[in-house]
Image (spheres, grey):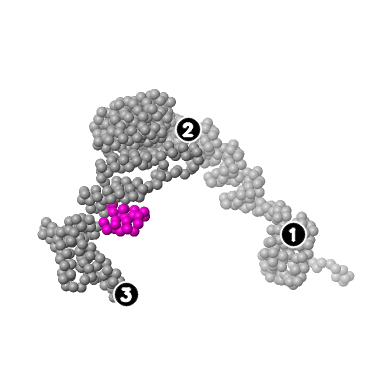
Amino acid sequence: MQDGGHHARSIKNRAPAAIQVTAEQLLRDAQERQESQFRAPKQLRGRKREEFEKRIRQTRSNIKEWLQYANWEASQGEYARSRSVFERALDVDPRSLKGRNVQHARNLFDRAVTLLPRVDQLWYKYVYLEELLQNVPGARQVFERWMQWEPDDKAWQAYIKMETRYGELDRASTIYERWIAVRPEPRNWVKWAKFEEDRTKLDKAREVFQTALEFFGDGEEEVEKAQAVFSAFAKMETRLKEYERARVIYKFALSRVPRTKSAALYAHHRPGKRRIQYEDELAQEGHNYDAWFDTRVGGGRIPRRGDEGATLEESRLPGQKRHWRRYIFLWLNYALFEEIETKVYTTAIRVVPHKQFTFAKLWLMFANFEVRQLDLPAARKILGAAIGMCPKEALFKGYIQLELDLREFDRVRTLYEKYIEFDPSNSSAWVKYAELESQLEDFSRTRAIFELGVTQQPLAMPEVLWKAYIDFEVEEGNREGARALYERLVAISGHWKVWIAYAEFEAAPIPVARELREEREEEEEEEETEMAPGDVERARRVFERGYADLRKQGLKDERAALLEVWKTFEEKNGTPEDVQQVQSKIPIVSARRVKANDGQEELVWDMVFPDDERESNPTSFQFLQMAHQWKKKQAEKAKTSQPEGALQSPGAPSAPSFTRASAATTQEQDTDMRDASSDVASSHGGD
């Protein structure tokens, strides 16, 4: 332009350029040509941070200051510091920061589910976002948009679970109805009915099942397809104790579908499957009471039918008790089921041949049943009839325990008298009877019962009764009475354990007499029981008597056992001389050879008691003692004289038991010792 004005140059060629530049290329070029971010020096950054910190302290609630601070840290490449500032800002005002991001996320999810409505993961995340923000109406709106696309079953279940979490059960039921309209599968009907049952809408649950059955129809193919619905319907009625309804449902379904195609129904319907199996087993063997038990417990019908059917078989049972045991347990099971029916017990008692054998458990359970019915006279009458008809130890114990629980001690005494009349040889019965009287503090009666019991002949396990009697006298502080009992017991049995117990009793302290204890307790009120000391000399004399008695009987093992206990006693209570005296009685174990029946020699070990040798072979016994003394000295001398390592090797043969009588060195004394040893061996049958 000649006039000097600034006018835009006109474009004459409006055709597109040969090389087109895309927006992506423009952005890439801008990124490449962008200058590097200015990074302030360290000191400057420190001053800048101080300024930001001062500003946010002054205006803490101003979120813009926080954002500027965080963005500046990010521009300096301090991303950790920037993140820390953002977190501090969130503590101050979380809504202002979240609001912008949440809205962006909501817009993004909205666009995503609009473009990709078949990607279920996007819908799940969208719903989770709204529920996380506690925007339940928004989450419900998202679900409604999703359900318009008729997604799979998991999406419907997620919608129902959300409504259930917030207590909107009616909305959840409506969603179930819409779900069934979209996918009327049997499992979906069952889930809907189970939901209604769980929220105690039983009429609604039945209505759902009935609607499902009407929907599927009653043809063979339709019923076969809806087996799960029939089974769930019957199970619900069973849980509600509506057994007749459940039975009708099962019968209807099984009548429409052949057995080959209704395996699932038969698996759930125990009367349909198991009863056929049980009835087949019972038809083959009527005495198979395991099958009767299974019919009663697992048959699915009223148990009374299986129990009453089993009672028809008792006439053909063998006459042995072991064949009746399972049968009687079936009766007991039947009686426990009925509980209020007395005729079950009476019928069971009537069929048992009590003259041959009886079942105490049956009688006791019948009596306990009457006790539960608060009819004590009937219970006593039952147990009295049982004892009169077929007395048995378990019946006596059960009847006695019943009266003890009722604190009827006079009746208990009468029962114990009948008990010991029935079986006077039962030691435990005598002991229990005496313990009862002792607990009732009738000590003269207790002592009389014990006296009567120990005089019974024969007596099973008499040691139990004698021990209880002696313990009673000891507890009463009656040492003379206990000593008299021990004297009677050793005169009867003479057992080495009785002698040991007798000696230990004499040495041990016992409580003082009961009268003295009661008087001193009233006066001093001492907690510890005063004890009367024992007599060691008496105990030692008892050991001597016991040793002499066992020696007289020729019991070597028992004498050795008594001596061991006696030695321990003397070590604890006696002097070294007393211990040495007992030690001198301990036997020496020797070996001798005996010819067997086949002519071969056998080595037999025997115990040689010094007392026996002293009386039978006094000379040989003296030489035997000398030989042992010499052997002991030689062993001690060998230990002191020989150095370590020069001792006899383990594999070398041991020295003989009897070699010399003393340390004499003359040839004549050596010969005498050998002769003495030969005499001792010959006296015991050795070579």
Q: Is residue 616 magenta?
A: no
Judging by the rendered image, the residue that carries numbered circle 1 is 66
Q: In the rendered structure, find residue 240 and report the number of the disc placed on it.
A: 2
Q: Residue 135: give x, y in percent of width and height.
A: 66, 46
**Mark 2 and mark 3: span between their CA atoms?**
92 Å
- Going from N to C along the chain, the mark reached first, 1 or 2, is 1
Frontmost residue, 538 versus 496: 538
Judging by the rendered image, the residue that carries numbered circle 3 is 644
Q: Residue 570: give x, y in percent of width and height.
A: 34, 54
Q: Residues within 10 Å of mark 2 (few under 14, many from 20)?
A: few
Report the residue at 24% width, 70% height from top: 651
Report the residue at 28% width, 40% height from top: 488
Circle 3: element type: loop
What residue type is disc 1 on? Trp
What residue type is disc 3 on? Glu
Q: Left or right: where does residue 174 sit relative to residue 458?
A: right
The residue range painted magenta reads: 561-585
Circle 1: element type: helix
Frontmost residue, 466 versus 244: 466
Residues marked 2 and 3 touching at CB (< 8 Å): no
Mark 2 vs mark 3: give the one in front: 3
The image quadrant that residue 320 belongs to is: top left
